Amino acid sequence: MADIIEVQHLCKRFGEVTAVDGISFTVGAGEFFGLLGPNGAGKTTTIRMLYGFSPPSRGVIRVFGMDISRDWRRIKARIGVCQQDNTLDPDLTVEQNLILFAGYFSIPRREARARAAELLDFFALANRRSAKVMDLSGGMIRRLTLARALINRPELLILDEPTTGLDPQSRHQVWDRLEKLKASGLSVVLTTHYMEEASRLCDRLIIVDHGKILVDGSPEELTLRHVGRSVIEIGGPDQALRDYLKAHEIAHDDLGQRLLLYTPDGNEISTAVRDNFCHDQCTFRSGSLEDVFLRLTGRELRE
């Protein structure tokens, strides 16, 4: 699979603050690629450099084989961007927002109308084509923003937290549309705080923190590598359990009143813990990408 994005030793500084610190990665054509990290990790800064909004302090970004610092006009004509914020025009209707945006790509008006109609059908907004943006729900606004990002039929779609603030029903509607775009072969780069979203959509992802890449791989690979298939959550763990885990060098996180034990399915130690220490507050579940994220980036709040 050819690389549609190549990032080499990318840095971004704001005065004395280094937001992105020498990261390198690639995104293959047709790949759904995720960029995860806590608040302030450098995700959005990286995304903004990818589509030419913010120039790198150092490093190289190539998109479609072209250098973003020199060929940004040609690159922007071939990508679609869905930003975090609502940047739709509130004075225009749903359809007018799409047709106006098509004009930025010199798409003829008749063709723009046809594309707008196609996208409104795809995102289940056809019955609201004449509504003003201010009359739409949050989920509709996000779907319209996605539709606008696709008006130029891009080869690469960049999504910066596309479902933040949506209710579960709206989020799943957006996921359904993104999965259909994925099936069509569109290349997508996504940032998100929803681990379920990343697990469901991404072929591969990186987790960044303090401007550096911590890991790179598929959600399944990362879960198996850093957590395992099974997790035991034990409430109110006693010292005997802590001593047992230490003696047997078993991977776990001690959260004080709760302990998370990471172990493969069918492991003898897992059976021993189940038989000897799980008398009251024990939960057995599968390992997840959220476990990986928290193990690697910590559990403290980020401002």
Image (cartoon, helix red, strand yellow):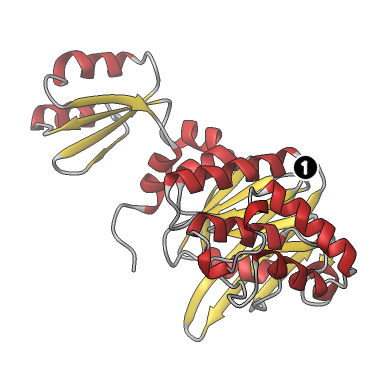
Percent position (x, y) of residue 301? 29, 60
Vertical relation: 247 (above or below) 5: above
- Along the horizontal axis of the image, is 161 left or right of 89? left
Quadrant in which residue 101 is drawn: bottom right
Mark 1 residue type: Gly
Residue 208 appears anywhere in the view = no
Residue at label 1? 185
* Residue at point 64%, 77% (across, down): 54
* Residue at point 45%, 49% (across, down): 194
Percent position (x, y) of residue 237? 13, 32
- Along the horizontal axis of the image, is 274 left or right of 169? left
Quadrant in which residue 248 is drawn: top left
**Viewer-nearest residue: 202 or 20:** 202
Residue 277 appears anywhere in the view = yes
Q: Quadrant of the N terminus?
A: top right
Q: Quadrant of the C terminus?
A: bottom left
Percent position (x, y) of residue 15? 50, 86
* Residue at point 81%, 67% (across, down): 75
**Viewer-nearest residue: 200 or 247:** 200
- Along the horizontal axis of the image, is 9 left or right of 287? right
* Residue at point 35%, 16% (across, down): 267
Q: How many marks?
A: 1
**Viewer-nearest residue: 60 or 77:** 77
Local crowd size for mark 1, using a 10 Å CA cut-off: few (<14), some (14–19), many (≥20): some
